[in-house]
Amino acid sequence: MNAVLLRRLGWWLVTAGLMCAVVAVAVKQQLPRLTGSAVGSSLASQRSEPCLPGTAVAILKSPHLSVAALRKVHYNSIPPTSGPHFAIPPTPGIYDAPLQPGAFVHAEEHGHVVIAYAPSLPAAQVSVLKDIAKAHPRDVLMTPYPPLPQGLALAAWGRLERFDQADRPGVERFIVALAGRYDHRWVGPPRC
Amino acid sequence: MTTSQRQASAVQAAAARLSLVAEGDDVLVGNPATATFVAVPAVGGVVLSALVEGHSVAEAATVAFEHSQVEVDVEDFLATLEEAGILVYEEGPALSGQVRWVSGVPSWLARPLFGKVAWFCYGLAFLFVIVAFAAEPALRPSFEDYLFVPDPMLSIICAYAMSVVIMIAHESWHWLAGRAIDVPARFRLSYRGIFPAAETDLSLLLTRPRRQRYGPMLAGPAFDVSLLALAIGLRWAYFDLGLPLSDVLARLLGALILMSVANLVLQCAVFLRTDLYAVLACALHCDNLYRISWLTMKERLLPVSAEESAELDSASARDRAVARWFSVLYLVGMFGVFWFLLNYLLPAAAGGFSWMVRDILSLSTGSPTFWEAVVVALLTAASNLAPIPLALRERRLRRLGRLS
């Protein structure tokens, strides 16, 4: 075998090795994701953790659904704390128009806290909530939520707390205790 | 017709249309009308300069001998340049296949944007970005920042529109920087690996000394950094100083930060012929590094055609030397792109596409969501499939000799 062919064989081996490595890594990383996409998120067991603010809510199966399919979904709480949702999460921040549950449930699945308030909540109290949301720009989504008859509700993955008015210490306590507790799975050891 | 049969004035006029730029021991001779360039020994530049000064062919040979103590067959040299398409005797429209070069903005208007003060400001903007990201982690981009309006599909449409506007502004900044030194440009759609891309062709920068080329090459990233600094500054003021921005604008700024950072990170992938690749090739004194690297790697793996072999043989020694290691970087980089394709792009495109199709099939045409889904599906398909026809088009143009 001449030198050119030998050298070419060497380069082929390097290229084939790189190709195998890329495919192996891709398969290893993608298989769970593809499975998850097909059957939805695996159903994590609830952590009751009674020392945390709010009350535990049973966790629903949480597949990715289309807009049309999500219109027929019924959740187990107002606002929902788990369940079917859109494939892409909305960014944390303050929303003046109502976010759809399919959007903010995905944010909860990423460990964010949702401040959902009744459209009837007085403007001064909404302003207090906005100040709190701005102080936690990466953790909080704030949205009007018409199904709420009054007051406001704080929702995190599998956790809910209701307030009649904007109770700054109570809201802060919920955010600090529950933000980042879940991100497609429970993060860290139990907090109680 | 040989050079000796031409009138001296015709030879001198043709030589006067060429650009001459000293490049180390060589001179880069170019025809700006056809954007073709070739490096020749310095004595070749002496010959052409003598012709431009009004000397005859015989006198130019004498000037060259006095300069370099080398006998130059000027007629043969000029015939070679003519064969290479550099020396063109008939002044007229650009050769077939050439796209119009875009000028328009006078250079004096563009110059302040790329003067020393301007570059100092771009540098300050870059420093501000680094300091802001270090000091305030909440300002760093997250993939979640992509969806910034309540309607998820409208968000995707808005994000596509924003990315197009940013891309146009980025390319326009390259073009303006070219105008600042009187170098015209042309725009075209191209691709970078698996990504569609707009491109500002500044080939005529080769008519300028290397140190003048860096500004137009870095102008696009300078725009990205400036936009990023502005978005970060406003978002920081909104969070911490109570700047009365609307909440949707604050979220849009987050998306802008994400897109600008993504653009700048992509620039570092020099194996994708990015702006930083152009800077690297210029700093390494290469003329056609990307093509020679590709051919070098092809030659390592497969037999190359006679034409490709001749192209490799005619490449400058510098291009060939750098291509030895750059081609390895290219190969590894392309496998990185392949990994990105398998891990992120294909799953995201497949997931998004199936999401849209399910909405299209289950909603009525009277629903706004139906039409949003149609638009997102089309955008997803176009952005993922566009590199294929673009690559085929460039391959065809290259075979026709209309793309270097």
Image: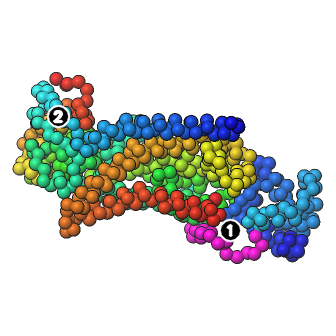
Q: Residue B101 magenta-drawn?
A: yes
Q: Which residue is mark 1?
A: B33
Give the left or right position of residue B19, taking residue B197 as reference: right
Q: CA distance from mark 2 to mark 1?
A: 68 Å
SS category of the residue bearing label 2: helix
Dot 1 amino acid type: Ala
Q: Please provide percent x and percent y for residue A179.
A: 23, 35
Q: Which residue is mark 2?
A: A174
Q: Which residues are magenta?
A: B88-105
Front in this rendered view, residue B226 or B66: B66
Q: What secondary structure is the magenta-colored segment mainly?
A: loop
Q: Is residue B182 above or below residue A107?
A: below
Is residue A117 in sight in this rendering? yes
Q: Position of residue B154 (x, y in %)?
A: 28, 58
How far across and how far down the image is residue B399, in percent? 62, 62
| Residue at point 43%, 58% (across, down) | B385
Q: Quadrant of the C terminus of chain B?
A: bottom right
B279 with respect to A94 (left or right): right
Splitting the image into 4 quarters, where does residue B340 fall?
top left
The relative height of residue B239 versus residue A47 in the rendered view (above or below) is below
Q: Position of residue B403 (x, y in %)?
A: 62, 62
Determine the residue positioned at 86% across, 70% down: B3
Identity of the residue drawn at 22% across and 42% down? A40
The amino acid marked with disc number 2 is: Phe
Name the subunit of mark 2.
A
| B390 drawn magenta | no
Q: Residues within 10 Å of mark 2 (few under 14, many from 20)?
A: many
Secondary element type, mark 1: loop
Q: Which mark is residue B325?
A: none
Q: For residue A122, say whether it is visible.
A: no
Looking at the image, residue A178 lies above or below residue B108: above
Q: Nearer the viewer, mark 2 or mark 1?
A: 1
